[in-house]
Image (cartoon, helix red, strand yellow):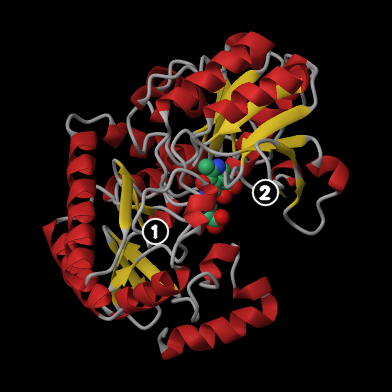
Amino acid sequence: MSDPISQELFARASKVIPGGVNSPVRAFRAVGGEPVFIKEARGPVLVGADGAEYVDYIGSWGPMVLGHAHPDVVAAIQDAATRGSSYGAPTEAEITMAERIRDAVPTMEMSRLVSSGTEATMGALRVARGYTGRDLIVKCIGGYHGGADYLLVKGGSGLATLGEPDSAGVPAAIAGTTLLIPYNDAYAIEKLFSERGSEIAAVIIEPVAGNMGCIPPDPVWLDAIRTQTQNHGALFICDEVMTGFRVAWGGAQALYDIRPDLTCLGKIIGGGLPVGAYGGRRDIMEKVAPVGPVYQAGTLSGNPLAVAAGLTTIEHLLRPGVYEDLERKGDQVQGLLEQHAGAAGVPITVQRVGSMVTAFFRDKPVRNWDESCDTDREAFGRWHAALLENGVYWPCSQFEAAFISLAHDAEALEKTGRAFKAAFAAL
Ligand code: KE4
């Protein structure tokens, strides 16, 4: 149950904003109840509208890897703001960002900044279609890559099916340019390419799934995508909007030693401000306007304040021991989940890659969308509410990953352990 102030704010918001929120997941519809409104945040803590404090595992759905209101990020934004908030003209900082991205993710020889992950995947898929001259794209059932029409599609049954709209307003003809395959299924990829390889422009995947809960990839599957795209003249796109700079300095492609043709970034590279990026092989990216025929543009692309926040954030991640620290914190949270669920006799499976983690309410591993759906989401909802009662704000959907920041200190983790104990015991 949210607090009286949040309830009042939610009633007011619902009159003027669809569902009272500016992004659907925030409405708590997947867990029941009404959303807690937040008035500020610092380090690992969110402060609710009524002043209640919560240990935060949303992290703005990934960007806040340093924790909230990091003094260096705040100072960088303030400093940039004194020089104006947007010019609509090129700046040196954008070059530095593209160079940092290239240094961290060597497959991104060239990149273009945009203002969201959605724009990043749209840009990557358009240049893939422009480069190959082909129309069909392939995505995973359960994969989420932002709100472009041709990505809001669901699959039918069977190994690889043409997409049907998964949202009103998406024309069937558009959805029909997307083929869907199960996550982690190498056979499905091989079969699809044997049948339609010459029509496919690109395969886009989350190299670690984060939008059906956290699902690590099967390396055999990753290799199959790389091999099949290579052999049939299609492009391999890694959507690292969530995993970029999260699971490793070089992202999931560094962790799993894969070389995609194009990569999408977002979240962390904006440090909490709106930034996305897409990039990859120079011969592909030189198809992008104004050099090549693939048009893509954005008023606030490369915005000076957002780039300042992003550069400061990723510069902090360059420091020695950062990813070992995130791994340690992630391991501690996983241990607390397993300890307290076990003690309460609640069957869960915890899946984690570094500092992104999901507690699946099921007693078997989750390798794809169907298995992610085979979870006790009613119990998850009650567990989520009990965590809120005990001062922990966990992602408000079984199909989301939780994010741990460098600011999650011993005090935050100790409070988390107490909340896990109480919430599992309450089920
Ligand atoms: P945005 O357009 O929301 O910046 O990014 C879209 C996107 C693209 N690719 C991946 C792998 C993503 O996870 C996302 C966005 N992630 C969701 C959380 N699962 C954003 C939260 C929301 O929709 O409110």
Q: Residue at x 49, y 81 (%)?
A: 33
Q: Residue at x 60, y 42 (%)?
A: 145
x, y percentage for residue 68? 33, 56
x, y percentage for residue 181? 63, 36
For numbered disc 2, what is the local secondary structure?
loop
Q: Residue 29: which quarter of the image?
A: bottom right
- Residue with the mark numbered 1: 58
Is residue 43 in view?
Answer: yes
Q: For this view, does 211 lie left or right of residue 331?
A: right
x, y percentage for residue 227? 55, 14
As drawn, the label of residue 147 is 2
Image quadrant holding the N terminus, namely bottom left
Q: Earlier in the sequence, mark 2 or mark 1?
A: 1
Q: Residue at x 20, y 64 (%)?
A: 342
Residue type for callout 2: Gly
Q: Residue 422: which quarter of the image?
A: bottom left
Q: Where 377 sits versus 349, above or below? A: below
Q: For this view, does 302 lie left or right of residue 150?
A: left
Given contact means CB atoms under 8 Å apart, are the residues at marks 2 and 1 in contact?
no
Residue type for callout 1: Ile
x, y percentage for residue 368? 50, 44
Q: Residue at x 45, y 66 (%)?
A: 396
For numbered disc 1, what is the local secondary structure?
loop
Is residue 111 in view?
Answer: no
As drawn, the label of residue 300 is none
| Label 2 Cα neighbours within 10 Å, binned few <14 / some 14-19 / many ≥20 | some
**Ligand 1 closer than 8 Å to label 1 CB:** no
**Ligand 1 closer than 8 Å to label 2 CB:** yes
Distance CA(mark 2)–CA(mark 1): 20 Å
Q: Where 272 sits versus 127, above or below? A: below
Image quadrant holding the C terminus, namely bottom left
